[in-house]
Amino acid sequence: SANGHLSDKVSFEDYLQPFPEGRDSKFVMSASSQFPSGAQSTRLGMVKQGLPQESGDFCPKQGADGWTDWWFTPDHPHLRSGDMLDFYHKYISLDKNEGKPMTMSFSQGARFAASRARIQARPRAYYARLLAALSKQMSPQEGYWMEASWYDVLHPESMQYKTDLCALPQVRDIMTLGPYAIDSMRQQLIKSAGADCTDCDDIDVDRRLYGAGDFKIQPTGDQVVLKTGGSAIIIVNEPTKFVEDANATVGVQKGISKKAGVSDNAVMVTMSVITSRRLLGRQLATQKVKVDYIIEYMVSSKEGGKTESDKLLAALKAIDSSALAAEILTQIEIASGTPNKYTVTVESFTAPTTISVLNAQGEVEEVTVTVVARGTAGGSILKSDISMATFLMVFLAQFLA
């Protein structure tokens, strides 16, 4: 990301100081994730620079007030595919995954420093096993989980499934990332920076929160990536709460995925309340929500991509509005674990007519979206996508020197 994943009051040179304050490692926790839900909280120093209370310490010195409220987006890299808890217990903590939820604080971008002794607290075989797990393909899902796990790798005496590292905000309503979550963050910034925070409206979500433009699927070998998208209009009884509700977002995401016949993680959705018109100076009430969806996933071969494209387009075209509304309500109930408080009618569902197919050479066929990965044209490999596996290789080389 453009800020180098560095929190406020932290510079790259800070990581070059040997044994900072007598410690044998340097971590600045800039994000926290809940697994398996994928809810996120971001250190305020990552959202805005120049906060008077930010110190660049291991945890924010203002405690839980140094973090944003918990937020959620279904397209976060941690949720792209698979199960983080399985990976963590198999490769990091080396024990049985009993399905217990876990919260992990970590340094975004895997920015840290560690002494030789700290590295050698784990045996060589431990790192070799991690390297093998991350070397199966370009931009592996495990790379994003690895980013969240480095502290536990280097500090086996304080694993986070046993103990919390930082004081974090109380989990109340987890907000879907969007205008309402951003407004909440803005109010937190004003509280932290003071009433004279004239630029607190300037929150660059993509760059500051999780580098949204820096992740997408990159095919290798014979693989291809399919990408398409469309929109829907939903009538709902409480549109503002619906758009803000993380469980509603999950319900819409999974509702579309079930009806399209694809993996839940292949679908990404964003929702917004449709602005009402004004009549004779009065604002007309609206109960409509616009849903924009993107479907993107990997297929093992070009030939399979053509077959899968035809199948996906047919499935999307066949989606019945009433059946989709029922599925959305079902998925919201499953996500929330409580009886549904919403009434949902799908007024319209727009299915795409073409799909973009990206191969490993960066070539796109049947182009409807020429930029397959946000922030990269023609499927070019992003530096952050390959950094985890590359870093591990360098890491092992230093370890064995």
Image (tube, grey):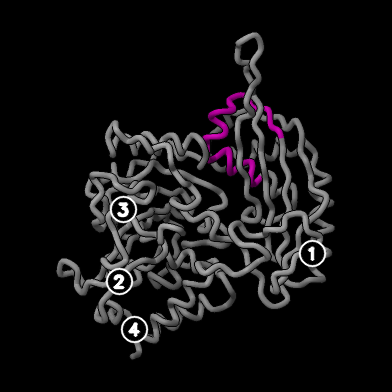
Q: Indicate the amino acid at tag 2.
A: Ala
Q: Amino acid at mark 4?
A: Pro
- Sequence-first tag of 3 and 2: 3
Q: Is residue 284 left or right of residue 261?
A: left
Nearer the camera: disc 2 or disc 4: 2
Does residue 236 appear in this view? yes
The circle on residue 8 is 3
Query: Which quarter of the rendered picture does the C terminus lie within?
Result: bottom left
Q: Position of residue 122 (x, y in %)?
A: 32, 79
Q: Earlier in the sequence, mark 2 or mark 4?
A: 2
Tell me the crowding category of disc 2: few under 14, some 14 to 19, or many 20 or more residues within 10 angstroms, Cα based.
some
**Labels 3 and 2 touching (C-beta < 8 A):** no
Residue 123 - label: 4
Q: Quadrant of residue 325?
A: top right
- Which one is nearer the viewer's eye here, 218 or 51? 51
Q: Secondary structure at mark 1?
A: strand
The residue sitting at 46% across, 59% down in the picture is 1
Residue located at (44% from left, 36% from top) = 173
Q: Earlier in the sequence, mark 3 or mark 4?
A: 3
Q: Residue at point 65% right, 51% down? A: 267
From what the image shows, is residue 40 above or below residue 94? Answer: above
**Is residue 351 rendered magenta in the image?**
no
Type of amino acid under label 3: Asp
Query: How far apart are labels 4 and 1 at the CA level?
Result: 47 Å
- Nearer the observer, disc 4 or disc 1? 1
Q: Nearer the viewer, mark 3 or mark 4?
A: 3
Disc number placed over residue 365 in the picture, else none: 1
- N-terminal of the pair, mark 2 or mark 1, is 2
Q: How far across and down, in percent of the image, does residue 47 sit?
A: 39, 47
Compared across the picture, whether 7 is left or right of 208 comes to left
Give me the C-alpha separation between circle 3 and circle 4: 34 Å
Q: Which residues are magenta?
A: 233-254
